[in-house]
Image (cartoon, grey):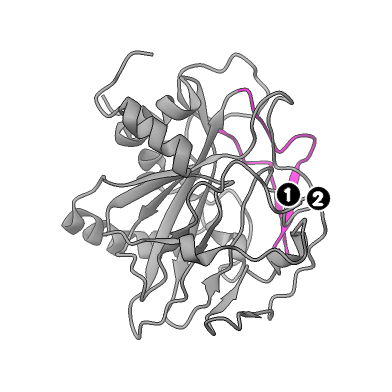
Amino acid sequence: MTKKKFSLSDEQIAQFRRDGYLGPFDLYDAEEIREEYKKLRAEMFDREYAVYDVDHASLLAGYDRHLDINFFSQHIMKRQILDKLEGILGPDIICWRSELFPKYPGDEGTDWHQADTFAHASGAPQIEWPSSEFGGAVTVWTAVTDATEENGCLRFIPGTQEEMVYDESKEMKYQPDQVNKLEKDGMKRGFFGYDYRNLQKDPDFVPDESKAVSIEMKAGQFVIFWSTLMHSSFPNSSKNKTRLGFTARYVPTCVKVYPETDTVDEYGTVLSLDKYGTVLVAGEDKYSHNRRVTKNTRDKEFALEE
């Protein structure tokens, strides 16, 4: 494959395969993203063009805002991101989902988890790889604000991406008031109203936190990781520092997205996929498995930066 301006080196690709993540990388100037954040706060609450008809209180209100907010539509097409992804996923890539992850002062941490088919909440696979290939998605997590241990940065356990310790076909009941109390350190954690421990193949499994690394990032930086990598986040223990992250999830075009369904049912909300579409961000789609859009709902084209 021809190396591009922002391609990963062979050493970086080897590191990613070993550890399951890479970064952080610089993307936006800190002052640039701070100014952009002021505008984004208003746009995030404006659902006139959003593809899903949900209220602001729904945990799914942050889903797929790249399909209606111009900044995020442009963000998922950044060459600084896509050149790197081609070294991991190959030349033909789609963005199948994005999510906004705000963590406000006092919010709990997110418990350790992995995602392969993303069936953990809905009960049905949301992505399906060819049977002979590895599952999961590559997640690009961008810090819109500074992300520190104090306000809830990500944590990874390197090298855990090759084996799923959770069975996503098991049932998790949605309990929005649920909070997991970890006796070891008293850290308040949960998983958006679910208890991820219900999916453990071994009920006695305990993640080895001695190997965990904190992924602190400055606003405007991003990190790349396999969704099957064990990851979590700290609670936001700050008094006044909101942490906002934006994730974009990518897979090769051979992967089927939302196979045989027209709705997403999770976190207490049912979404209609009537206005949804994947975005071809690199190469070509030789499979035509998935519904696809070429413009966002404000009529902005998904175009690579030249």
Q: Nearer the viewer, residue 35 or 149?
A: 149
Q: Secondary structure at mark 2?
A: loop
Tell me the residue at 24%/24% (across/down).
Answer: 5
Give the left or right position of residue 58, taking residue 126 as reference.
Answer: left
Q: Nearer the viewer, mark 2 or mark 1?
A: 2
Residue under label 2: 169
Q: Is residue 77 visible?
A: no
- Residue 68: mark: none
The answer to which image quadrant residue 44 occupies is bottom left
Q: Do residues under tags 2 and 1 come within 8 Å of each other at their CB atoms?
A: yes
Q: Is residue 276 magenta?
A: yes
Q: Image point 60% across, 13% down: which residue?
A: 286
Magenta segment includes 143: no
| Category of crowding for the residue at label 1, using alpha-carbon neighbours closer than 10 angstroms: few (below 14), some (14–19), many (at least 20) | some
Q: Residue at x 34, y 49 (%)?
A: 222
Image coords of residue 175 (percent x, y)? 74, 74
Q: Which residue is mark 1?
A: 119
* Amino acid type at image mark 1: Ala
**Magenta extent:** 254-278
**x, y percent for residue 15:** 39, 37
Which quadrant is home to the N terminus?
Answer: top left
Amino acid type of disc 2? Ser
Residue 66, percent from left and from top:
46, 45
Q: Residues within 10 Å of mark 2 (few under 14, many from 20)?
A: some
Disc 2 to disc 1, C-alpha distance: 7 Å
Please state if 248 lies on the left or on the right of 33 as rendered. Answer: right
State whether the magenta stretch is mostly helix, strand or loop. loop
Compared with 4, 82 (above or below) is below
Residue 57 appears in which quarter of the rendering?
bottom right
Q: Is residue 176 visible?
A: yes
Q: Quadrant of the C terminus?
A: top left
